[in-house]
Image: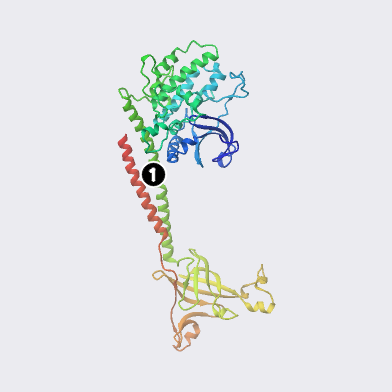
């Protein structure tokens, strides 16, 4: 038993409610996220079951299927998980109806009507033949939906059937703890028949609960036998008999139970009468129920089916339910991988188109044997640029420092603007550079400003320096008498008598073109989507064959 305050998933234990054949029950409150401050009913699987080898995978698979069940007559699973050894299932809390009448059990100080047993013991006069119809209709709707999904309860009893009044003042029921009985029957693979029989689903505290539930199961059922639909149909018949007996014992007897007694006799196969073939047949026979199709229940004739054929039909429904779940999962995976693949391919196309007209962003283009280099930030028409300070603009010496600028397109070329604060101003004034910077403190004349015009060659992925401009000259690449290529003023080339000839200065990209990760992801996720699609087709064919 866990102490109050113990954390189970995103909730904290408030009270221990009891222990039954399917585990421990707790009242808890949410502590985080969307469940914060909400009250919950927590079912904790018995440790002797949860520590069996392979149980965790089985638990996750089974509860995921049970979690899909919801609607009229079902108290749905709100969440589940594993915290250390604790395998828990969470349901929403039911406040229950406060009871102002005298309690049947002496010593009871506070009790509310939450389940069928509470209703019969605290408010027996409320259970009339008409209210019985309302309770059994909602119960049948829940069991019918569970059976369609291949889930059998196997442990129907008054405490597992919650009751609430609807807006019309009628009592409605909802079955809770669906599938937990089967969950507790888990035994590891590879055990012999004798070893399996040695594993009990019971513990000392849960023995009374198991014995109580056994009253509502067909005779001759062994404790480790997997439940089937007939158990639930039998239990509903026994529940009606139990209700009638309890109501008559706790209130003035009502003489109009004859129709319900006949129905319950048939449900349990009493007096040689054959039990109902399905939940729909059972519901169709309820006294004064009318057309059950308005409740979404349809009778499918299965007359002449043997017990083995009925079991095969149940297993087929269960397989179909699991196959539909797998198909939904594959569709989701196919959609996600396909979307990521398309987005990656779209990015690859956009990036490739960009590189056709502009150099690779944030990549260094350098000149072999020199410090000069350029980097351009991403942009369609303009962006940030990085370069190296030329020696002619470095009042302190040979340049070589990094400088930040900006670029824009102009007449088919990339025009890069750089500027450097004049060091002479610092020396004359005795101030540091940061003391000049401020609103209205500096102007363009306080900087050495130059413009580099570059031409991008897509074929070689290189930048060619066309010219450099400043306030005094226009410089172009040329080869002098010493055979060295560098920048010369245009007028010097013009009046150099042919000794200085125009040349080219080309800046190549430092890094080699490697793997295009966007194309890699596009191909990878697209292939994954195709594989999921292929598996989905196979699964769809399998579902069609089962149908």
Residue 78 vs 496, above or below: the answer is above
- Say which residue appears at 38% left-offset and 54% top-offset: 524
- Residue 434: image location, x then y, percent: 66, 70
- Say which residue appears at 50% left-offset and 28% top-offset: 206
Badge count: 1
The residue under label 1 is: 330
Task: Please give left or right for residue 281 compared with residue 411 in the image.
Answer: left
Residue 264 vs 527, above or below: the answer is above
Colour scheme employed for the rendering of this structure: rainbow
Judged from this view, the residue extending furthest toward the bottom is 497
Q: Can see residue 345?
A: no
- Residue 403, quarter of picture: bottom right
Q: Can see residue 70?
A: yes
Label 1 CA crowd tier, 10 Å (few <14, some 14–19, many 20+):
many
Q: Secondary structure at mark 1?
A: helix
- Residue 208: image location, x then y, percent: 50, 25
Quadrant showing the N terminus: top right
- Residue 421: image location, x then y, percent: 61, 74
Task: Please give left or right for residue 473 compared with residue 523 in the image.
Answer: right
Q: Nearer the viewer, residue 361 or 261?
A: 261
Residue 333 vs 111, above or below: the answer is below
Judged from this view, the residue extending furthest toward the top is 255
Quadrant showing the C terminus: top left
Q: Nearer the viewer, residue 394 or 46?
A: 46
Q: Nearer the viewer, residue 417 or 110?
A: 110
- Residue 546: image location, x then y, percent: 31, 35
Residue 239 vs 66, above or below: the answer is above
Task: Please give left or right for residue 232 compared with residue 172 in the image.
Answer: left
């Amino acid at each position: 038993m866990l102490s109050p305050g113990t954390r189970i998933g995103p909730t904290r234990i408030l009270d221990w409610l009891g222990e039954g054949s399917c585990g421990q029950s707790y009242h808890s409150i949410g502590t985080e996220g969307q469940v914060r401050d909400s009250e919950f009913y927590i079912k904790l699987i018995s440790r002797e079951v949860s520590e069996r080898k392979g149980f965790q995978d089985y638990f996750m698979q089974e509860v995921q299927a049970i979690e899909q069940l919801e609607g009229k007559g079902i108290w749905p699973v709100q969440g589940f998980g594993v915290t250390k050894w604790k395998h828990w299932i969470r349901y929403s809390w039911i406040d229950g109806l406060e009871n102002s009448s005298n309690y049947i059990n002496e010593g009871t100080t506070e009790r509310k009507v939450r389940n069928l047993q509470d209703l019969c013991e605290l408010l027996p006069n409320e259970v009339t033949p008409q209210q019985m119809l309302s309770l059994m209709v909602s119960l049948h709707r829940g069991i019918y939906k569970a059976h369609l999904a291949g889930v059998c309860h196997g442990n129907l009893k008054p405490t597992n059937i919650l009751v609430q009044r609807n807006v019309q003042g009628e009592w409605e029921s909802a079955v809770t703890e669906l599938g937990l009985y089967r969950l507790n029957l888990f035994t590891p693979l590879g055990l012999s028949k004798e070893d399996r029989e040695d594993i009990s689903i019971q513990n000392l505290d849960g023995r009374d609960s198991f014995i109580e539930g056994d009253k509502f199961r067909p005779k001759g059922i062994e404790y480790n036998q997997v439940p089937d639909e007939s158990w639930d149909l039998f239990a509903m018949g026994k529940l009606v008999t139990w209700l009638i007996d309890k109501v008559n014992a706790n209130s003035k007897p009502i003489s109009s139970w004859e129709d319900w007694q006949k129905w319950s006799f048939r449900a349990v196969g009493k007096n040689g009468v054959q039990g109902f073939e399905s939940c729909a047949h059972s519901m169709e026979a309820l006294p004064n129920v009318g057309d059950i199709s308005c409740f979404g229940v349809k009778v499918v004739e299965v007359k002449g089916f043997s017990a083995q054929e009925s079991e095969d039909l149940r297993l087929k429904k269960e397989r179909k339910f699991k196959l539909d779940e797998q198909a939904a999962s594959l569709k989701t995976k196919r959609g996600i991988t396909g979307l990521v693949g398309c987005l990656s391919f779209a990015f690859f196309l956009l990036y490739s188109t960009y590189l056709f007209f502009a150099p690779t962003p944030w990549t260094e283009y350098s000149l072999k044997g020199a410090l000069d280099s350029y980097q351009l930030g991403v942009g369609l028409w303009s962006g940030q640029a990085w370069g190296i300070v030329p020696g002619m603009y470095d009042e302190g010496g040979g340049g070589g420092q990094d400088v930040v600028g900006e670029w824009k397109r102009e007449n088919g070329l990339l025009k890069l603007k750089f500027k450097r604060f004049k060091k002479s101003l610092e020396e004359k004034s005795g101030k540091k550079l940061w003391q000049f910077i401020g609103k209205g403190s500096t102007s363009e004349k306080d900087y050495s400003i130059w413009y580099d015009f570059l031409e991008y060659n897509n074929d070689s992925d290189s930048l060619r320096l066309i010219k450099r401009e400043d306030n005094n000259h226009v410089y172009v690449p040329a080869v002098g008498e010493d055979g060295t290529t560098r920048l010369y003023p245009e007028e010097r080339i013009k009046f150099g008598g042919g000794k200085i000839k125009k040349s080219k200065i080309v800046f190549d990209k430092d890094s080699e073109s490697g793997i295009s990760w966007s194309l890699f992801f596009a191909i990878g996720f697209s292939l994954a989507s195709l594989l999921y699609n292929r598996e989905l087709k196979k699964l769809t064919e399998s579902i069609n064959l089962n149908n």
